[in-house]
Image (tube, rainbow, N blue to C red):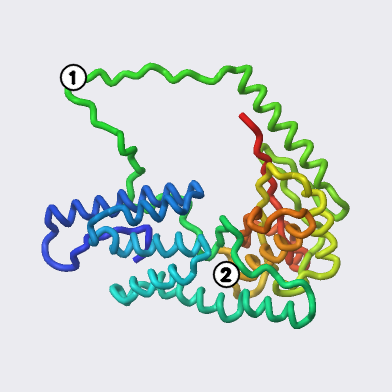
Amino acid sequence: MTATETQPVTVSGPRTDRDLATGLRVEYTVARATAKARAGDLDAALRELDRADDPAVTRHRDVTDLRARVHAQRGELEAAERCWRRLLDEHPDDESAEAALARIRRFRRTGPAAALARARHRGRPAVAVALCAGAVTAAWVLATQLPSGAREPVSDSAAVPRAGQDVRQEPKEQPGRAAAAAAEARRAQALDALAQAVRTPGTRVERHEDSVEVVFAQGLFAQGAEPTDAGVAQLTRVGERLAGQRNLRVEVLGHIADVPGAPTGGGSLTSLWRAMTAARVLSDAADRPLTGFLVASAEQRDAPHDTDAANRTVTLVLTPHTDS
């Protein structure tokens, strides 16, 4: 049973009208909360999950699992762990919850604490080991589609037309062409200027429709999340170019080398730690708060290079915010 499935609350006996109504409320709650989380508003997602006054909804396994995932995305691992443990108490066969708890145990045992201890032991600057605000890790990322049994969320103010009611609507007024063209021109100008500003030796800068991508030509890490001296220097040069770029979204995506027998998708904790390490170096160089960086593990199939050594790296995705 996964968070993308729904089922009646009762486990035996015929389904009643109450069971059907509860199932619909669960689907509605999961759909609305998923939409909020997908939009990046994790606080609103939690409110959606807790708004029902029916324990059969708020304690449903789908709702509990989604609540745990949202807590994990917020970096609240203790709250996420409590949710998944409660789910396992009620549904001991839930493999997804068991796997999530195992990831948390590995993260605590070998992740941030170990990286911080090694960094301090060597006398190097401590690696950033806390999730940056807004970071979404591959380990906890929500599905990009709504749950399979869920309906698209409906506005609270939506109403069914009454019989005989004229449901025709006037077409919405489109923004003026001149204003749209001006906004597009400002966006293009900002992207061109940004691409030029962050271009440094040893990087490939790709200008996309809404963002600028910075790809490092050489690997930045020798192993694990420990950057090489050359990697630190490379990240520092780019970070200095980001100084003063306040109206900018900076996403750091960690990559890993191809390891035989390792998963081919879903990202990894190693790539996430690399993203956090790189964000710390960039933060110091750019004099930009660490919370101003989004960090995530990239999918293995999105590795930027063909060689393992070069893929021990991160990629930066820079998105300027312009007034519309």
Q: Position of residue 185 (x, y in %)?
A: 70, 26
- Residue 228 as seen in the image, left or right of residue 208: right
- Residue 84 as seen in the image, left or right of residue 17: right
Compared to residue 321, the image places residue 2 above or below, namely below
| Mark found first going from the N terminus, 1 or 2 | 1
**What residue sits 35% from the left and 43% below the top?**
153
Badge 1: few (under 14), some or many (20 or more) residues near its Cα, within 10 Å? few
Task: Kindly state the secondary structure of the residue where label 2 is placed.
Answer: loop
Cα–Cα gap, marks 1 and 2:
58 Å
**What residue sits 71% from the left and 44% below the top?**
246
Between 312 and 229, the one nearer to me in the picture? 229
Tag shown at residue 263 = 2
Q: Amino acid at mark 1?
A: Gly
Between 59 and 255, the one nearer to me in the picture? 59
Tag shown at residue 136 = none
Task: Kindly state the secondary structure of the residue where label 1 is placed.
Answer: loop
Q: Quadrant of residue 245?
A: top right
Tag shown at residue 164 = 1
Badge 2: few (under 14), some or many (20 or more) residues near its Cα, within 10 Å? few
Q: Amino acid at mark 2?
A: Pro
**What residue sits 57% from the left and 81% below the top?**
109
Q: Quadrant of residue 190?
A: top right
Q: Position of residue 90 (x, y in %)?
A: 28, 73
**What residue sits 49% from the left and 64% below the top?**
72
Q: Position of residue 297 (x, y in %)?
A: 61, 62
Quadrant holding the C terminus: top right
